């Protein structure tokens, strides 16, 4: 009787599902991971204000509006006195 030969899969990670990692898939996944990490790096750095060193997650304040309101209060006091 002829014995049946065992057929070994070419890829060791084929397993039961039959899914194989190809060279193109590995390159695509690594390129996507690199792009996502670069976007994350740029996003975190865009949260750091010019005169600061840590990211600020708060909404921006209206500095001009606050300064103008203080200026108006001072000018009214000068007129009254």
Image (cartoon, rainbow, N blue to C red):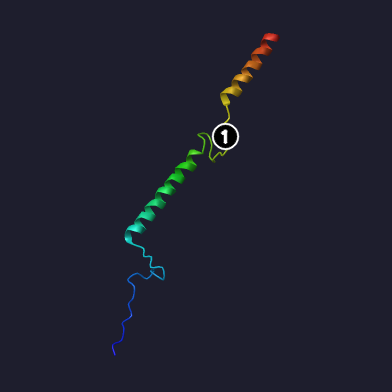
Q: Position of residue 25 (x, y in %)?
A: 35, 58
**Looking at the picture, does residue 14 appear above or below residue 53?**
below
Residue positioned most to the right: 81
Q: Residue at x 56, y 23 (%)?
A: 64
Residue that sits furthest to the front in the current view: 1
Q: How many marks?
A: 1
The x and y percentages for residue 9 are 34, 73
Label 1 Cα neighbours within 10 Å, binned few <14 / some 14-19 / many ≥20: few
Q: Residue at x 63, y 16 (%)?
A: 72
Q: In which image quadrant can residue 6 be found?
A: bottom left
- The quarter holding residue 60 reads top right
**Residue 5 screen position, x and y as percent:** 31, 82
Tell me if 80 is positioned left or right of 10 in this view. Answer: right
Residue closer to the observer: 69 or 79: 69
Tell which residue pokes out farthest to the left in this image: 2
The answer to which image quadrant residue 74 occupies is top right
**If the image is split into quadrants, where does the C terminus sit?**
top right
Q: Residue at x 45, y 42 (%)?
A: 42
Residue at 31% x, 86% y: name it: 3
Question: Quadrant of the image for the N terminus?
Answer: bottom left
In the image, residue 6 above or below residue 12:
below
Mark 1 secondary-structure assignment: loop
Judging depth in this view, the residue of 39 and 22 nearest the camera is 22
Tell whether 30 sits left or right of 49: left
Residue picked out by circle 1: 59
């Amino acid at each position: 009787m002829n014995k049946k030969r065992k057929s070994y899969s070419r890829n060791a990670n084929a397993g039961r599902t039959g899914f194989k990692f190809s060279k193109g898939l590995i390159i695509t996944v690594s390129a996507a991971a690199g792009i996502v990490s670069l976007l994350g790096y740029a996003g975190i750095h865009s949260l750091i204000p010019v005169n600061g060193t840590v990211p600020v997650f708060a909404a921006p304040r209206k500095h001009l509006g606050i300064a103008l309101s203080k200026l108006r209060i001072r000018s009214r006091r000068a007129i009254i006195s």
